[in-house]
Image (cartoon, helix red, strand yellow):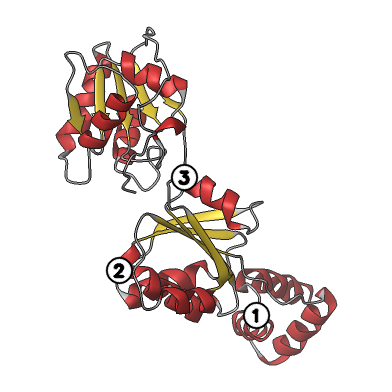
Amino acid sequence: MGVIIECAKGGSSVNYQMVPLSAGLYFVGVPIGTARDITLRALDVLASADVLVAEDTRSMRKLMDIHGVPLRDRRIIALHDHSGDGVAMRLVTAVKEGKSVAYASEAGMPLIADPGFELSRLAAAEGINVTCAPGPSAVLTALTLGGLPTDAFFFAGFLPNATTARCTALEKLKETAGTLVFYESPKRLGAMLRDAASVLGATRNAAVCRELTKKFEEVRRGTLTELAEVYGGKSPKGEIVVLVDRGHLESVNEVDLETSLRKALVEMSVRDAADMVAQAHDLPRRKVYQMALALEKDR
């Protein structure tokens, strides 16, 4: 996600330290908004690494300027969605030659909906040392503020742009037993909420978290229908995370479920009986199918 780094006038008073870094790939978490959210270790790594890599070189340079971390004779290498495969390979080669390489996303934790994933996968395949200086995350910050259950959650990233593809993706998430977390573009927010209400359920609770950690931070809560009405006619500014509560499926007594299956199995195959009973009780098909298999075996 993009970010405009904010900092109080006069810059940061945090002091970095030059530390010896062993050869390896260092993923560095950077702020999602407020520049002072960066960790001391992250500043140390940025100050000390032999090679600097960033999804957005301008954001990286601005962050280093705010905290007084000198670039020295290093240049910041760009690694983004349009970089060729050769960039990642050159970085891995640099580590093999004994250099420390630090990579940072444009905002937040690296590899979360971020092009750094390919670099991480290549590093693992090549067997080089990889570590992380963790930092802020829009996903976790939104979960903290959203007011929805956090005991289990599923990060779905960005949904497809087209309505049909978006609804198909939402349908696959309908029975997820945890809070759903999405990144979304301000221009598509209203349409996304409308489709989510249609597919996931109009009364599902949700939260729209906007501009987290920044001056105009806002968290708006309500049902999917309510939020779709709020954002249906406008495109809010800033970075957005959408949370959707898990589906609360009908509680069905095991005895009643078994009775329904036994009746269905008299005239139907295991597959057809499971489909009919699962649909009738709004239950996950897999659970019902496994019970149907056990009952058929007993027969």
The mark that comes first in sequence, 1 or 3, is 3
Residue under circle 2? Answer: 161
**Location of residue 249 (image quadrant):** bottom right
The residues bearing labels 1 and 2 have C-alpha atoms spaced at a distance of 28 Å
Of marks 1 and 3, the one in the foreground: 3
Going from N to C along the chain, the mark reached first, 1 or 2, is 2
Q: Find numbered disc 2 in the image and state the secondary structure of the residue it sits on.
A: loop
Residue type indicated by callout 2: Asn
* Foreground pick, 256 / 199: 199
> As displayed, is residue 105 above or below residue 147?
above
Q: Amino acid at mark 1?
A: Asp
Of mark 2 and mark 3, the one earlier in the sequence is 2
Q: Position of residue 286 (x, y in %)?
A: 62, 69
Helix, strand or loop at label 3? It is loop
Q: Is residue 128 visible?
A: no
- Placement of 137 over or under 28, stated as above or below: below
- Using the rendered view, name the quadrant where residue 48 is placed: top left
Per the rendering, the mark at residue 282 is 1
Within 10 Å of disc 1 (Cα), the crowding (few <14, some 14-19, many 20+) is some
Disc number placed over residue 142 in the picture, else none: none
At a point 15% along the width and 40% down the height, the residue shown is: 84
Name the one closer to the observer, 233 or 30: 233
Q: Nearer the viewer, mark 2 or mark 3?
A: 3
C-alpha span from label 1 to label 3: 39 Å
Query: What is the C-alpha distance between the residues marked 2 and 3?
Result: 27 Å
Residue 294 appears in view: yes
| Nearer the observer, 76 or 61 | 61
Tag 3: amino acid: Thr
For mark 3, what is the residue? 213
